[in-house]
Image: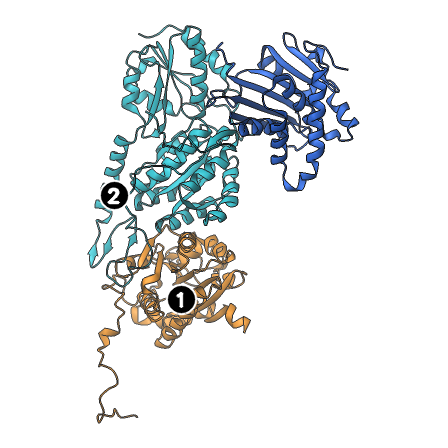
Chain colours: A cyan, B blue, C orange
């Protein structure tokens, strides 16, 4: 199941750095407010937004911190504007209180986690804020898909009135790829009759964006109990409706390799090579990290004798794989922490020959089934 | 290995200041302008000059499956010997290897490749523009592979120059042409051009 | 003493005292007897009415006792995170530049949790009006020391009175903001007497006029009574404010771009 948002095929190919392509895709999706604080490799997106937003009639603010940046975005989004922020790892950590707030007061916004590696899986899928909320997270495998996901995320944020995350990385932020950019063609959404525009003052029907949802003395709201139950129900509904994944050869392969984001593109490449050499191997890729495509994974691993998890961290998605895989005893971890000496990007483990060796080594081990 | 002839992968290796990123970008932009899919991935140290600099360019007719960290490449341009250890790791047997013979000994560049040495730094000095050695190498490489037309390469180079560097356009174009001319006299398989 | 002329009809209809309440207040507040914050709310909302801004105003309300005003004020409101109101107001104003945007924050909210917010918003020259309700204590949590607690003031976290050596000095945020280039109007008022209430209302009006004129960030610090947090009786609150706070926080206009231009 692809996360593809339809894009006009006739748009010309342009060679764009990922950060530029994402910025332009966001603006084509009518994003008109962006605020962020520089942090590599997110910085390129901030610079592109600063360059491109004014001509689009929008605003980009180099905020004094990630905390201010995300709260400016909550303000902008509360007026109905499409708004986004971004950072990576530590910067996203600073935003967690506001991400939870946006989830609970139902402000739609997009967070670009242009991460340094894959160590933010828990941060994206579990979050660090308070309350019963989730953050829908898309993990593109390359720049063209990051463009599609960007446009889809603005749509989903509005559709569900919730903060959503694009989980990118240095390869997506900094690689230049030929992409086609066009305004997305997505289903129409309900008007934002909840948005603050100031016009309802004094009518008795003035609007509130309020996590506690108590309403007015003259028109009480659901209050925290009712509102937070409703928000939790909404996330349960999203969990059922928005799972995205893709896989290949799952039904016919002894060994299935699970990976997300850039690592999934490397996996796809290596698995194709191995299959051409006659190995019985396939791959499965969660596109939404939350909601995790658990039922699809269970189905895909029904006949697998080995389920190999390849991620560039100490084993975070591994938890989700173990939760949903058909047989937990088949799971082996072949990823690991691997950081470039600069600290800003992947280390040597994200490499096709290394992955190939790890898959072959795992396939040489006896299976449990 | 899969047949990957449908995608052409090029490794460009050298040190910062040699224009590694710019020539990679020029080739990728020229391919994109000609309607093909291209990818340019870069890796370089923090220094503007003197540190290792590497670019990879992939060109294909369809959306690319090649990785931003190339699994292997069909060709390589090597501008400096300090950082060409990547070649035996990644360049496929029989691949095209174009080396800057002013700095790198083509004989030492590795076995099993189609090697062409081009004294790009010397030619650039003769042109009076020593900083254009990279464009000389690119002009030669493109003449050998025919990936894009010479005109597409020159147009891409011009389109990528920022306004404050636009005065270099003519000398860069001259360097592309000099490289293209030199390639005509180049014998591959380890023979060094004079 | 003037005598009402009963020979001619009155020029306007008779008004009961209760009708002086702004219709923007939808019901009773639930704060303590003697609290100054409802008075500040009333003059804020009356000002919006008088400036004809009621249907083009968005408020951003922080966290403190005044947070409960969201339930009784008939104005579009974003109730934001503690300390973050100037950032949220920035996003709102940039997307809706035709609205009047204000923040309502306490001293704990603006000067403790969100100190940098108001300073940076002022430095950016954001055209928003920040209303600081300064009573020198965390009222909502039961009377702890804030960054503006005056020296000598007893709180639950400075039981023997705020001592500079132990607890540091209070921060005069309005003076700091007044020194920032992007500020348009900065003033300090109080609501402990009828006279100061009327004066402070004028300061609020000036601040919104400054915002509408695009002069940059405007800030009105309002000293408000918190008899509960101060451990005094409700009737003693106004006098206590006069004796303790106004010495540390002198009232008046601290900065006015338009006045300085004239």
For label 1, the SS is strand
Mark 2 belongs to chain: A
Give above or below for A59 relative to C148: above
Describe residue B162's horizontal placement relative to residue C82 as left or right: right
Specify whether disc 2 shares its chain with disc 1.
no
Residue at position x 20%, y 59% from top?
A218
Q: Can residue B32 be spotted in the picture?
A: yes
Cα distance in 3D space between marks 2 and 1: 34 Å
Q: Quadrant of residue B20?
A: top right
Give above or below for C72 relative to A91: below
Residue at position x 78%, y 30% from top?
B128
Residue C74 at x, y percent in the picture: 27, 61
Mark 1 belongs to chain: C
Q: Nearer the viewer, residue B9 or B107?
A: B9
Q: Which residue is mark 1?
A: C222
Give above or below for C16 relative to B148: below
Residue A304 at x, y percent in the picture: 32, 12
Give above or below for A209 relative to A339: below
Foreground mark, 2 or 1, reads 2
Residue A74 at x, y percent in the picture: 38, 48
- The C terminus of chain A sits in image quarter: top left
Q: Crowding at label 1, few (<14), some or many (≥20) Cα neighbours within 10 Å?
A: many
Residue at position x 72%, y 30% from top?
B131
Q: Which mark is residue A228?
A: 2
For label 2, the SS is helix
Q: Crowding at label 2, few (<14), some or many (≥20) Cα neighbours within 10 Å?
A: many
Q: Nearer the viewer, residue B66 or C217?
A: B66
Q: Quadrant of residue A278?
A: top left
Q: Which mark is residue C194?
A: none
Q: Can residue A128 be spotted in the picture?
A: no
């Amino acid at each position: 199941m692809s996360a593809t948002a339809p894009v006009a095929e006739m748009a010309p190919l342009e060679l764009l750095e990922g950060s530029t392509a994402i910025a332009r895709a966001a603006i084509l999706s009518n994003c008109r407010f962006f605020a962020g604080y520089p942090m590599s490799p997110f910085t390129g997106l901030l610079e592109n937004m600063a360059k491109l937003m004014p001509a689009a009639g929008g605003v980009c603010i180099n905020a004094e911190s990630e905390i201010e940046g995300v709260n400016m975005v909550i303000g902008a989004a509360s007026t109905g504007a499409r708004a986004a922020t971004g950072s990576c790892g530590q910067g996203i950590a600073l935003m967690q209180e506001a991400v939870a707030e946006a989830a609970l007061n139902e402000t739609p916004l997009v967070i670009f986690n242009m991460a340094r590696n894959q160590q933010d899986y828990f941060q994206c899928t579990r979050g660090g804020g308070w309350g019963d909320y989730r953050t829908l997270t898309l993990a593109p495998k390359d720049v063209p898909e990051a463009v599609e996901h960007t446009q889809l995320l603005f749509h989903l944020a509005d559709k569900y009135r919730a903060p959503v995350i694009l989980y990118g990385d240095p390869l997506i932020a900094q690689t230049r790829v030929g992409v086609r950019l066009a305004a997305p063609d997505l289903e129409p959404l309900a008007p934002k009759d909840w948005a603050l525009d100031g016009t309802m003052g004094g009518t008795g029907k003035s609007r509130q964006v309020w996590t506690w949802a108590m309403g007015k003395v003259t028109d009480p709201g659901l209050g925290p109990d009712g509102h937070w139950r409703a928000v939790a129900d909404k996330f349960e509904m999203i969990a059922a409706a928005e799972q995205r994944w893709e896989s290949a050869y799952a039904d016919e392969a002894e060994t299935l390799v699970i990976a997300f984001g850039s690592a999934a593109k490397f996996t796809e490449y290596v698995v194709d090579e191995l299959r051409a050499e006659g190995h019985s191997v396939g791959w499965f890729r969660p596109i939404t990290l939350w909601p995790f495509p658990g039922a699809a994974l269970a189905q895909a691993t029904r006949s697998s004798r080995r389920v190999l998890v390849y991620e560039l961290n100490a084993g975070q998605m591994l938890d989700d794989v173990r939760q949903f895989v058909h047989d937990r005893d088949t799971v082996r971890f072949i990823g690991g922490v691997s950081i470039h000496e600069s600290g800003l990007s992947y280390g040597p483990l994200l490499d096709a020959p290394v992955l190939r060796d790890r898959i072959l080594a795992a396939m040489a081990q006896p299976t449990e089934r | 290995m899969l047949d990957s002839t449908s995608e052409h992968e090029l490794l460009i290796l050298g040190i910062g200041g040699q224009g590694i990123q710019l020539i990679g970008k020029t080739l990728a932009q020229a391919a994109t302008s000609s309607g093909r899919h291209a990818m340019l991935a870069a890796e370089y140290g923090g220094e503007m000059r003197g540190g290792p600099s590497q670019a990879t360019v992939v060109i294909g007719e369809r959306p690319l499956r090649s990785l931003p960290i190339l699994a292997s490449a069909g060709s390589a341009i090597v501008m400096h010997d300090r950082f060409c250890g990547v070649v035996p790791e990644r360049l496929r047997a029989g691949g095209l290897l174009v080396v800057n013979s002013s700095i790198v000994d083509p004989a030492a560049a590795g076995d099993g490749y189609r090697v062409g040495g081009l004294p790009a730094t010397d030619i650039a000095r003769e042109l009076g523009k020593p900083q254009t050695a990279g464009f000389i190498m690119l002009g030669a490489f493109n003449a050998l592979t025919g990936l894009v037309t010479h005109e597409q390469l020159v147009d891409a180079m011009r389109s990528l120059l920022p306004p404050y560097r636009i005065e270099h356009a003519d000398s860069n174009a001259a360097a592309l042409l000099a490289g293209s001319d030199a390639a005509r006299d180049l014998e591959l398989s380890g023979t060094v051009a004079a | 003493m003037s005598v009402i002329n009963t020979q001619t009809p009155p020029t306007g209809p008779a008004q009961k005292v209760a009708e002086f309440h702004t219709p923007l207040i939808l019901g009773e507040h639930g704060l303590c007897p003697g609290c100054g914050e409802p008075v500040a709310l009333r003059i804020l909302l009356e000002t919006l009415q008088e400036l004809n801004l009621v249907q083009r105003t968005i408020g951003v309300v922080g966290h403190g006792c005044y947070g409960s005003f969201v339930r009784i004020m008939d104005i579009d409101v974003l109730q934001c995170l503690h300390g973050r109101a100037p950032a949220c107001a920035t996003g709102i104003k940039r997307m809706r530049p035709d609205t009047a945007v204000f923040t309502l924050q306490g001293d704990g909210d603006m000067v403790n949790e969100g100190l940098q917010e108001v300073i940076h918003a002022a430095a950016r020259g954001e055209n928003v009006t920040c209303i600081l309700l300064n009573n020198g204590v965390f009222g909502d949590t039961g009377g702890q020391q804030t960054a503006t607690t005056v020296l000598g003031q007893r709180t639950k976290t400075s039981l023997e009175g705020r001592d500079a050596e132990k607890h540091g000095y209070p921060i005069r945020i309005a003076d700091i903001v007044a020194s920032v280039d992007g500020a348009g109007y900065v003033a300090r008022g109080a609501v402990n007497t009828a006279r100061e209430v009327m004066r402070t209302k004028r300061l609020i009006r000036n601040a919104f006029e400054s915002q509408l004129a695009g002069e940059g960030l405007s800030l009105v610090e309002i000293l408000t009574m918190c008899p509960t947090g101060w451990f005094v009786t409700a009737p003693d609150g106004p006098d206590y404010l006069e004796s303790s706070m106004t010495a540390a926080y002198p009232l008046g206009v601290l900065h006015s771009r338009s006045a300085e231009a004239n």
